[in-house]
Image (cartoon, rainbow, N blue to C red):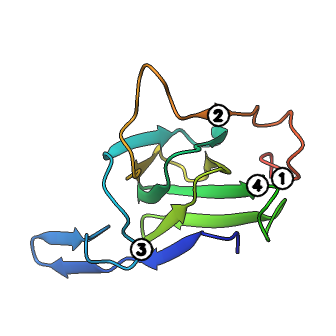
Amino acid sequence: MIKGTRIKKLKVYFDSRGRLMEILRCDDKIFQKFGQVYITTAKPGIVKAWHMHKKQDDHFVCLVGKIRLALYDGRKNSSTYKKVNEFILDAKKPILVQIPKSVYHGFKGISKVESIVINIPTRPYNLKKPDEYRLDAFDNDISYNWRK
């Protein structure tokens, strides 16, 4: 696994009224600090990649549908330099993936419905100076195939 990446299996509690799922708590070992919470979506077959942040870690959870999340370690000083990890985030088997700063990541909607992903980054988005660095999803040096 890419250095600094962590996974948390999420618990879902069911009763006659519906369900409750805890995602991230301040007393979790995986918790660092709170920046903001937002959702992003991907329609079936759509790729949203690649980007990374130099100042924040991300925490992805799929709430509706299913996505294929890919990570690429472009950190030259990392023991996992050039390593790629792939995770299936499925609303029916929920996990949280912590994505370390400076690790490129992206995802593809792989369900028949529009997938909804929640992200809990460790820093709020700065509109004037975005901490976001992008690569084209298909035209880059990362050995990963989004077309599969």
- Between discs 1 and 4, the one toward the N terminus: 4
Describe residue 54's horizontal placement relative to residue 11 as left or right: right
C-alpha separation, residue under disc 3 versus residue under disc 1? 27 Å
Describe residue 6's horizontal placement relative to residue 62 as left or right: right
Residue holding disc 1: 144
Residue holding disc 2: 133
Kind of residue indicated by mark 4 = Arg
Kind of residue indicated by mark 1 = Tyr
- Between discs 3 and 4, the one toward the N terminus: 3
C-alpha separation, residue under disc 1 versus residue under disc 4? 17 Å
- Between discs 4 and 2, the one toward the N terminus: 4
Crowding at dot 3, Cα within 10 Å, few <14 / some 14-19 / many 20+, comes out as some
Question: For the residue labelled by badge 3, is the local secondary structure a helix, a strand or a loop?
Answer: loop
Kind of residue indicated by mark 2 = Tyr
Of badges 1 and 4, nearer the viewer stands: 4
C-alpha separation, residue under disc 3 versus residue under disc 4? 21 Å
- Between discs 2 and 1, the one toward the N terminus: 2
Which quarter shows the N terminus? Answer: bottom right
The x, y position of residue 114, in whole percent, is 47, 43
